[in-house]
Amino acid sequence: MKHDQDDLQFGQLLKQESYPATDNRWFTRRVLNRLPARHHRSWFMTAVYVIVALVCALSWRSMIMNLDGTVTVRDLLYMAIMALVTMYAIVSAAATVIRTE
């Protein structure tokens, strides 16, 4: 990051003119108690996402391997359902990751 002369002068001014911080041992605890709680993704949810991803991948593989050259309405219905289930799994996993960060 490139600093120009104004930034450097402003930083020096802030260092020179600032008041020294007072020693308050309760400050950190009070600040941390007011912050929103952290949500960590548990190992259980990670395992569930991995299992769902494996089930989706195996289902797609099985569906594609069982195609015998002709595509029936049943095959199209299964593909549509699997596409919806896969998209739902991806969106719910992404939403959980985004929400916890």
Image (tube, rainbow, N blue to C red):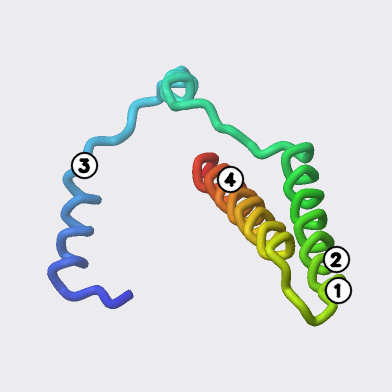
C-alpha separation, residue under disc 1 versus residue under disc 2: 5 Å
CB-based contact (under 8 Å), mark 4 and mark 2:
no
- Classify 10 Å Cα crowding around label 4: few (below 14), some (14-19), many (20 and above): few
C-alpha separation, residue under disc 4 versus residue under disc 2: 24 Å
Residue receiving disc 1: 65
Q: Mark 4 is on which residue type?
A: Ser
Mark found first going from the N terminus, 1 or 4: 1
* SS assignment at label 3: loop
* SS assignment at label 1: helix
Q: Mark 3 is on which residue type?
A: Ser
46 vs 18, left or right, is right
Nearest-to-viewer mark from 2 and 3: 2
Residue receiving disc 2: 62
Image x and y of residue 4, in percent? 19, 75
Image x and y of residue 100, in percent? 54, 40
Mark found first going from the N terminus, 4 or 2: 2
* SS assignment at label 2: helix
Q: Is residue 17 above or below residue 30?
A: below
C-alpha separation, residue under disc 2 versus residue under disc 3: 68 Å
Q: Mark 2 is on which residue type?
A: Ser
Which residue is at the front of the view, 4 or 70? 70
C-alpha separation, residue under disc 3 versus residue under disc 4: 48 Å
Image x and y of residue 40, in percent? 63, 36
28 vs 1, left or right, is right
CB-based contact (under 8 Å), mark 1 and mark 2:
yes
Q: Residue at x 33, y 74 (%)?
A: 1
Residue receiving disc 4: 92
Which residue is at the front of the view, 64 or 33? 64
Q: Which mark is residue 18?
A: 3
